[in-house]
Image (cartoon, grey):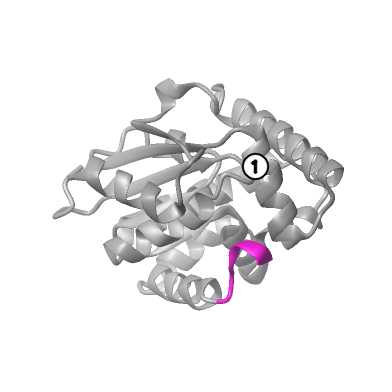
């Protein structure tokens, strides 16, 4: 990846691995925006977007995507990992995402990536940008015990609750990825770099990624 050119780093992560925090800290180190699924969902709701509305907005106002990004950055300032877990645990984990919702998400990500370099944490980013000339795809993993302990600590859940939540989210994300990409999120061939967080801090993982980028 050439850091002197517009680039995209996509991060897929397991719930409880610390991958979202790694992505946010990596973006801060690189001085670029950070986007994740929770933020994109909030923006979709805020603007009530469809693919048709996106095309109309792009055609009617040249700076619309820049305004959209500025809103994303403003909203993102108040979103920490605890907030992310709270929102996620409040959702129906078995909710089926429609094809229209996926296309809107894809359209948003493709257009924000056109504006500037960025770090994107999301389930299908590795697939959406697979043909991008300056893209690195990363997977952040951790052993189940590591993940359980982290979710218990961050969300204040019992061990049983944390384990059940992780299993449900894993199933939901794998189903989503297979449905819209035809691939498994656990297939390491999807990624340029796979990091196991066992024994690592988020900062150490960020340094590993920066060393890989060069």
Q: Residue 189: x and y, percent?
A: 41, 21
Q: How many marks?
A: 1
**Residue 79 to residue 144: above or below:** below
Kindly identify which residue carries mark 1.
147
Residue at 56% x, 22% y: name it.
182
**117 or 147, which is in the foreground?**
147
Is 81 colored magenta in this rendering? yes
Please, what secondary structure does the residue beneath circle 1 have?
helix
Across and down, in percent, residue 117 comes to 29, 57
Instruction: Classify 127 as above or below 65.
Output: above
Extent of the magenta region: 78-83
Residue 123 percent location from the top left of the image: 56, 40
* Residue at left offset 65%, top offset 60%: 84
- Residue 82 among those drawn in magenta: yes
Which one is in front, 118 or 16? 16
Task: Work out whether residue 100 can be spotted.
Answer: yes
| Other residues around mark 1 within 10 Å, as few (<14) / some (14–19) / many (≥20) | many
Which residue does the image show at 45% across and 33% down from the upper left?
Answer: 127
Q: Quadrant of residue 25?
A: bottom left
Res. 49 in view:
no
Compared to residue 183, the image places residue 6 above or below, namely below
Using residue 185 as the reference point, say whether residue 26 is left or right of it.
Answer: left
Q: Residue furthest left?
A: 4
At 64% from the left and 71% from the top, the residue drawn is 46
Tell me: 186 left or right of 30: right
């Amino acid at each position: 990846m050439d850091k002197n050119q517009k680039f995209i780093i996509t991060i897929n992560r397991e719930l409880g691995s610390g991958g979202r925090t790694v992505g946010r800290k990596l973006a801060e180190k690189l001085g670029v925006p950070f986007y994740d699924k929770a933020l994109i969902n909030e923006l979709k709701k805020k603007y009530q977007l469809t693919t048709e509305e996106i095309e109309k907005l792009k055609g009617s106002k040249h700076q619309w995507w820049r305004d959209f990004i500025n809103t994303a950055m403003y909203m993102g300032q108040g979103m920490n990992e605890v907030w992310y877990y709270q929102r996620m645990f409040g959702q129906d984990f078995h909710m089926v995402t429609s094809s229209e919702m996926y296309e809107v998400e894809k359209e948003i990500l493709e257009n924000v990536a056109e504006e500037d370099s960025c770090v994107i944490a999301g389930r299908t980013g590795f697939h959406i940008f697979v043909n991008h000339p300056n893209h690195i795809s990363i997977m952040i993993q951790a052993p189940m015990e590591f993940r359980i302990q982290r979710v218990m600590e961050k969300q204040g859940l019992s061990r049983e609750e944390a384990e059940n939540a992780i299993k449900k989210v894993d199933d939901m994300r794998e189903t989503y990825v297979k449905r819209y990409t035809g691939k498994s999120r656990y297939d390491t061939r999807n990624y340029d770099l796979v990091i196991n967080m066992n024994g690592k801090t988020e900062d150490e993982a960020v340094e590993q990624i920066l060393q890989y980028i060069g």
